[in-house]
């Protein structure tokens, strides 16, 4: 029986990964959770991992934790758990910059990294060996599957698809003033709070552009809005053939291929895409009047180390919006200011320590008002 470690098990990707693991008979050696102790305990009882990480476990959690489960906690607990595990696959579904260190540890251990933590590639893609990764993002999994057994030299352009997010049908002048409740009503996907917000202003697609840049080693990357989220990615080859990857919008497909590629065809819970009832497919350019951040795409591709600035400023701004400290539209201002202020600084980034130092500087400099 194959086995895996699932980091971020209480989030959207993590809960789906546990369902896939159970369906495909993948043993779960270890789990890591965040603040949802109740759900984590339910997962422990259901999937019986041997090891668990929780940053600051409560007394109630310690009381209810089965005695045969090794608990790791504290600042270096996650690192300790990963080093104590033997599973060949680590699924990193952690959200945010915190996911970078587990990514590095997994790659240092020469294990297969099923990567859903996009921030790892956004901030440090130039330091990571992507050959040991299987991307879990639906768009990058789509590109990955299309490029199997193909030479990257044959590729002219990579295309990502975008749903347009919850506010896609509003007028440009209406978008900056929308409430958190409206921003979180994604039309196609059930995702975490931060990624749903980032989908509504195209921040998420900027992250995905940088992910694709590091995963596939190509700068010719673009995106279109495809409202059904049935087309996840396209590749235009130099012979001018255009290949597309289509499937039902369901993250269990890439998760299954990452956890157990030989058994992925057994993932019966994924509904087939019925071409006879699929609405007509239409591709729309991303309108920078609605999504002003999309105008930054070429700048980021020209200097992809700006991903450190993009991620840090976006995390701070998005959290401020969640907490009601700024309007939705002010996220754009904070990200743009960050990129302008630190653009020259990123050119001297040389190692991981530089990334952590710059990340802290950016977060400290963000002006919330």
Image (cartoon, rainbow, N blue to C red):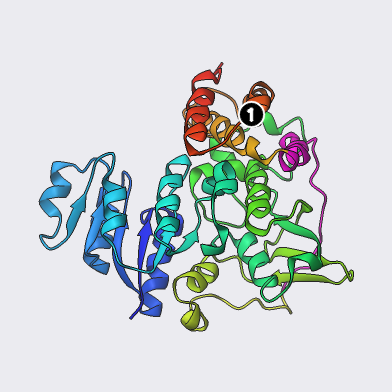
Identity of the residue drawn at 18% across and 42% down: 58
Pointer 1 residue: 335
* Total labels drawn: 1
The residue range painted magenta reads 278-302
Residue 209 vs residue 225, the one in the foreground: 209
Task: Indicate the position of residue 125 as horizontal and vertical percent values.
Answer: 58, 48
**Residue 320, can we see it?**
no
Residue 345 vs residue 157, the one in the foreground: 345
Q: Quadrant of residue 83?
A: bottom left
Asked if the magenta segment contains residue 232, the reply would be no
Q: Is 152 placed above or below 348 here?
A: below
Task: Indicate the position of residue 88 as horizontal and vertical percent values.
Answer: 38, 69
Dividing the image into 4 quarters, which one contains the N terminus?
Answer: bottom left
Identity of the residue drawn at 71% across and 39% down: 300
Identity of the residue drawn at 50% across and 68% down: 252
Task: Indicate the position of residue 209 as horizontal and vertical percent values.
Answer: 68, 49
Tag 1, which secondary structure?
helix
Dividing the image into 4 quarters, which one contains the C terminus?
Answer: top right
**Residue 86, can we see it?**
yes
Q: Is residue 24 left or right of residue 301?
A: left
């Amino acid at each position: 029986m194959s086995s895996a470690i699932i980091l971020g098990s209480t989030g959207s990707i993590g809960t789906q990964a546990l369902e896939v693991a159970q369906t495909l008979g993948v043993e779960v050696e270890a789990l890591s959770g965040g603040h949802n102790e109740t759900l984590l305990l339910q997962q422990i009882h259901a999937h019986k991992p041997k090891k668990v990480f929780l940053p600051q476990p409560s007394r109630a959690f310690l009381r209810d934790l089965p005695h045969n489960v090794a608990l790791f906690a504290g600042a270096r607990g996650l690192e300790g758990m990963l080093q104590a595990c033997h599973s060949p696959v680590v699924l990193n579904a952690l959200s945010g910059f915190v996911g970078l260190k587990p990514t590095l540890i997994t790659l240092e251990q020469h294990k297969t990294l099923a990567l859903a933590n996009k921030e790892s590639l956004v901030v440090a893609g130039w330091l990571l060996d992507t050959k040991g990764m299987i991307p879990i993002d639906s768009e990058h999994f789509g590109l990955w599957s299309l490029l199997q057994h193909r030479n990257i030299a044959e590729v002219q352009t990579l295309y990502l698809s975008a749903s347009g997010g919850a506010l896609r049908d509003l007028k440009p002048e209406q978008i900056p003033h929308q409430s958190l409740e409206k921003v979180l009503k994604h039309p196609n996907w059930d995702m975490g709070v931060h990624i749903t917000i980032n989908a509504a202003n195209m921040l998420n697609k900027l992250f995905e552009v940088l992910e694709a840049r590091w995963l596939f080693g190509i700068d010719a990357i673009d995106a279109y809005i495809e409202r059904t989220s049935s087309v996840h990615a396209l590749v235009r080859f130099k012979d001018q053939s255009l290949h597309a990857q289509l499937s039902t919008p369901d993250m269990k497909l890439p998760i299954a291929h990452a956890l157990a590629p030989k058994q992925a065809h057994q993932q019966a819970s994924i509904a087939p895409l019925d071409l006879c009832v699929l609405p007509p497919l239409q591709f729309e350019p991303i309108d920078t009047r609605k999504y002003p951040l999309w105008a930054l795409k070429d700048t980021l591709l020209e200097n992809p180390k700006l991903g450190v600035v993009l991620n840090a400023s976006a995390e701070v701004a998005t959290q401020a919006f969640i907490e009601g400290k700024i309007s939705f539209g002010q996220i754009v201002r904070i990200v743009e200011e960050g990129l302008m202020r630190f653009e020259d600084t990123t050119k001297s980034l040389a190692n991981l320590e530089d990334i952590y130092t710059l990340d802290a500087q950016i977060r400290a400099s963000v002006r919330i008002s």
